[in-house]
Amino acid sequence: MFILYFAPHTCSLASHIALEEAGADYEIRLIDFNVREQQSSDYLEINPKARVPALKTPQGVLTETPALLAYIAQRFPEAGLAPRDDAFAFAEMQAFNSYLCSTLHIAHAHRMRGYRWADDPAAIAAMQKKVPDAVSACYALIERQLLRGPWVMGARYTVADPYLFTIAQWLEDDGVDPDLIPRVIEHRSRMSERETVKKAIADEQAA
């Protein structure tokens, strides 16, 4: 049994979808950000980073979305969620997921979490002003070069797809013009029609 600790409208959705795709035996546990549950002593024992997602496995707890996605893909090889037979292709998938985590997600976070990087209100406002340009540049690169189509890695669906789908939920709020990234929008629409995606979203809404 696996336990995924999640919060709505966060990147934890990517791991949730991957668990569903893998056919894993799992439960989800809501961490309520509205009452700062992520900073509670009980949750800090699970994830001292005070973030989601966290995945409790029989071997211990894992954190960080790229790590969770790689683990799920390798733990459930029969699901075919990663090119495990090709070391270079697997590394390419990891490079894409790392870009989402370390660059695109960080650019997005400057919109509402500038306090992580500055205390000066003017500096935080400047970060927020930069978000549309910074996030749009990330999506422009994905649109032109990184998204092979129809899935991130080409013909083969992988754990990179739920990750891109999850982060792409926020692009309009970040000030990105969807008309400039039609392939990303098509990918998001294609993902939204998968039964696994619909179930993960419905389960989170009901939690």
Image (spheres, helix red, strand yellow):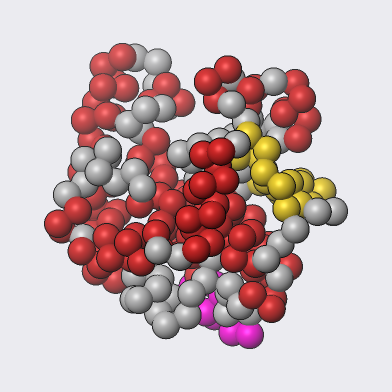
| 99 with respect to 67 (left or right) | left
Residue found 36% across the figure and 48% down from its top: 169
| 24 with respect to 121 (left or right) | right
Q: How many marks?
A: 0
Q: Position of residue 197 (x, y in %)?
A: 49, 58
- Residue 127 higher or lower than 85, as above or below: above
Please name whichever residue, 27 or 36, is drawn nearer the observer in this view of the structure: 27
Magenta-tinted stretch? 85-92
Residue found 55% across the figure and 42% down from its top: 204
| 50 with respect to 121 (left or right) | right
Q: Can residue 151 be seen in this view?
A: yes
Q: Answer with the quarter of the image where residue 49 lies.
A: top right
| 178 with respect to 25 (left or right) | left
- Residue 101 higher or lower than 149, as above or below: above
Q: Is residue 114 highlighted in magenta?
A: no
Q: Where, quadrant-wise, is the C terminus in this rendering?
A: top right
Q: Where is residue 189 in the image (x, y as percent from the top left)?
A: 32, 61
Q: Where, quadrant-wise, is the N terminus in this rendering?
A: bottom right
- Residue 188 higher or lower than 158, as above or below: above
Q: Where is residue 98 in the image (x, y as percent from the top left)?
A: 49, 57
Q: Position of residue 196 (x, y in %)?
A: 53, 61
Q: Is residue 91 highlighted in magenta?
A: yes
Q: Is residue 134 visible?
A: no
